[in-house]
């Protein structure tokens, strides 16, 4: 479980552009899975929600954040994976 520390200006700007709230970021850091990088940074992500009914048919976003070794949030993003 990670706690929200400092947010870089770039990350804050990206959050505003993408409609990601501070509460969503807190939830991501509290419940997300962590992948450690070789430079000490961490990628924290939440997997997509369970599949929706087939009529929804559109891919679900996956929320992730990149946190540096000092604990500063560098960027926050929603990524959509299209399945072939």
Image (tube, rainbow, N blue to C red):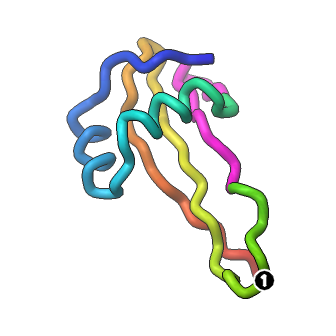
Where residue 20 appears, as percent x and y from the top left, is: 38, 48
Where residue 53 appears, as percent x and y from the top left, is: 77, 77
Residue 64, located in which quarter of the rendered image? top right
Q: Nearer the viewer, residue 24 or 4?
A: 24
> Total number of numbered labels?
1
Which residue reaches farthest top? 70
Residue 1 versus residue 17 in the image, above or below: above
Where residue 8 appears, as percent x and y from the top left, is: 27, 30
State left or right for residue 22 relative to residue 35: left
Residue 80, located in which quarter of the rendered image? bottom right
State left or right for residue 14 relative to residue 56: left
Quadrant containing the N terminus is top right
**Residue at 55%, 34% in the rendered image:** 28
State left or right for residue 23 relative to residue 31: left
Near mark 1 (Cα within 10 A), the count class, few <14, some 14-19 or many ≥20, is few
In the image, residue 3 lies in the stretch drawn in magenta: no
**Residue at 49%, 16% in the rendered image:** 3
State left or right for residue 62 relative to residue 18: right
Q: Which residue is mark 1?
A: 54
Residue 36 versus residue 43 in the image, above or below: above
**Residue at 74%, 71% in the rendered image:** 52
Q: Classify mark 1: helix, strand or loop.
A: loop
**Residue at 68%, 55% in the rendered image:** 48
Quadrant containing the C terminus is bottom right
Q: Nearer the viewer, residue 67 or 5?
A: 5
Residue 9 versus residue 56 in the image, above or below: above
Q: Nearer the viewer, residue 29 or 52?
A: 52
User: Which residues are drawn in magenta?
Assistant: 35-48
């Amino acid at each position: 479980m990670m706690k929200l520390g400092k947010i870089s200006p770039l990350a804050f700007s990206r959050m505003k552009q993408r409609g990601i709230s501070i509460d969503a970021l807190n939830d991501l850091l509290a419940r997300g899975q962590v992948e450690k990088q070789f430079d000490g940074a961490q990628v924290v992500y939440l997997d997509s929600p369970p599949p929706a009914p087939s009529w929804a048919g559109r891919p679900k976003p996956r929320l992730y954040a990149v946190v540096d070794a000092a604990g500063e949030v560098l960027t926050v993003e929603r990524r959509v994976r299209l399945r072939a």
